[in-house]
Amino acid sequence: MSLLVVCCALLCVARPGLGASPSRVVFSELMYHPFGDQDDLQFIEIHNPGDVAVDLSRWAVRGGVDFAFPRGASIPPGGYRVVCRNTAAFRVCHGDSTNVIGTFTGSLSRKGERIELADAQGEVRDAVHYGDRPPWPVAADGHGASLERICAGAASNDPANWCASGIGAGEAFAGTPGRRNSCDSPVPLPRIVEVCHDRPVPGQPIGVSARVTDDAGVASVALHWEAWLVDSPIAKGETPLIVDQAASDRARYVGAIPGQPESCLIRFVIEARSVSGAVRLCPSATDLHPTFSCATHINTNTARIPFLKLITFGRIQKPGVARRVQALAEESARPPWATRMDWSCAAVILPPGETGLLMFDHVRVRRRKGGYKIEFQPDRPWQGLRAVNLILEGSPRYLLSEPLAFELYRRAGVPSPATDHVRLWLDQHALGCHLVVEQPNRAFFRRLGQEPDGNLYKLLWYGDGVAGQHEKKTNPDTGYADLLDVIDGLRKTVGLARWDFIRQHFDVDELAGYFAVCMCIQNWDGFFNNYYAYRDPRPGGKWQIIPWDQDKTWGDYDGASPAYDWYEMPLTYGMAGDKPPRRSWFGGWPDAGAPWWRPPGWFSGPLLAEPHFREQFLARLRELCDTAFTEQAFGPVITALEQRIEPEIVYRASIERRDTEVALRRFRGDIESFRDQLVNRRRFILRQLTESKPLSSVEADSSP
């Protein structure tokens, strides 16, 4: 069978744009999406590449931002000037000696936009329409780097004339505002596009080709490569690329990487030198994809879930107390720039029942509670997912309870993280089946077709007050005003005014569905905490809840019976005025009558006690018990999960040297407990729905 050819889209693609003569002032650097969404650190740098000073009086920057240069402003020959969004914040990060000339209004779009530099007569002297996706450097899109112009005399709108800034050792913030760019070149660099490589086969050479051009002429093209086996380099080399004599395009260069053994990760870059002496490495060393990559793994997966082989080069240690302490100490000692830019790991995914594989290089792998977190590149997500959590914590039952819970939320129309299972290897260590849970982030909202730039808060069970219990995940520089305002509105409104306020600020149908599913699966921790709150940033945007951390559901709680035969969480749970059960249980919340009891949540307390919302919530709950939450509808979901995961229980027990029969008995008992929950919890809900009475008033105290 002929080799498959995998073509890689390159960042260096030519586009027509404005030229720049030596006498012109040009845009030279843009920080449009600072690390951590700190938009106050946005800046724009202009550069005078000429040999005479330029008077900037009444010049302007316009587009997504506006700035008018003051009278008397000028830029010396070879000089730089910076305008920023917040001068005080900028100087804290970059110091005082950065040639800051003023503060612009508005903000640079994180998605890309056109900005212009106009002179005193309104004539456009330079313009650039930057982007946040290839061929523009993706490292500038929130990963710590700025966009730096390479050659002042080359086109502004050409992505190949821009690079991501580097980050030097010890520097907390990237970019070179007010000084020469790290990638500055007096002449345009060679252009490298259409890079392709053959599908790797163990032991066989891997053909590589690229199209290379330069206005001054191409002097040489070389291929630099390195092969890794698990966490050790086994070979590296440099191979000249020569003009493909068989191709009609004389700019096509070809060569090959020598054959490598099975299960190798191979990385390579292409170096082009022009007659003028300019050199380009493709990809750039500052990109999030600093190399092209391929792998010689053979897919032998006959299981029912994907195999995931993480290659961390020893950076992430296998779980264990001593190693975990050592790894955490090493991580805490690393400077901030190293943490944010460490995209050095790789992931090889072998789908079940297929011959091919999925290769994701330059991903970020971090330790998290109970497992690992993987972040994929913006231009190469896995099944549309930018970040996933690999979880194997506590009871093996959690491998089942979380995906079953999220599936019911999805069936109820509630935006929920995607889930899956993988059999995981960390370098050479087999770790067994892990639950995969998508991380709620901007990519999550994009995948759902929603606006991604709103405020996202993670609810915590600890913390002091509203801000203390809500961990803000996006837009940290905008504060908590929207959250404080909506909670204050819920507290202060009464009667029909509260119902009007709820309809104005919340997605009522979606929230009714969320609380209804919480009732079905007895998500006792999902009213007070263990969810994300998100507000759509557009005018009139509403609040919604994203479910999270669903392990202790379906009859499980701290101190639950091993049979998980608890079915009696009342339908008044989570609302203002709800009281703990009278019977005494060991443990639980202070002064609680049961360990699963929590006080009302910031949202759930006033929402569930408002008569009109409660009516919709109970109607939604009855609808679920008639449709999705039934033996006929959800029983097959439990059975399918059982069939999918049962072989993994045997595999995990074998690699951990445990009794497989004992593991299987426990697994089958867990499966039966889910079926029992489906029957008995549904019966309890229907009985309470029949006995429930409409609320005639709202409790005054709606705070947690």
Image (spheres, rainbow, N blue to C red):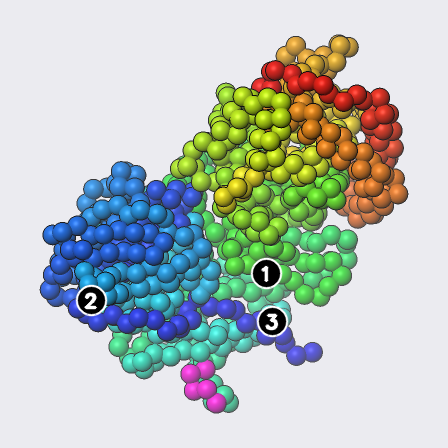
Q: Secondary structure at mark 3?
A: loop
Residue 38, position as x, y percentages in the image: 39, 42
Q: Residue at x 43, y 49 (%)?
A: 142
Q: Is 22 left or right of 208, judged from the image as shown? A: left
Q: Residues within 10 Å of mark 2 (few under 14, many from 20)?
A: some
**Which badge, 1 or 3, is on the more N-terminal residue?**
3
Q: Which residue position holds label 1?
A: 359
Q: What kind of residue is marked 2?
A: Arg
Magenta span contains residue 250 = yes
Q: Residue at x 65, y 52 (%)?
A: 308
Residue closest to the eye, 261 or 172 = 172
Q: Which mark is residue 199?
A: 3
Q: Is 631 left or right of 533, judged from the image as shown? A: right
Snapshot quadrant of residue 139 = bottom left
Q: Which residue position holds label 2?
A: 24
In 3D space, how far apart are the residues under numbered discs 1 and 3 (Cα atoms)? Answer: 11 Å
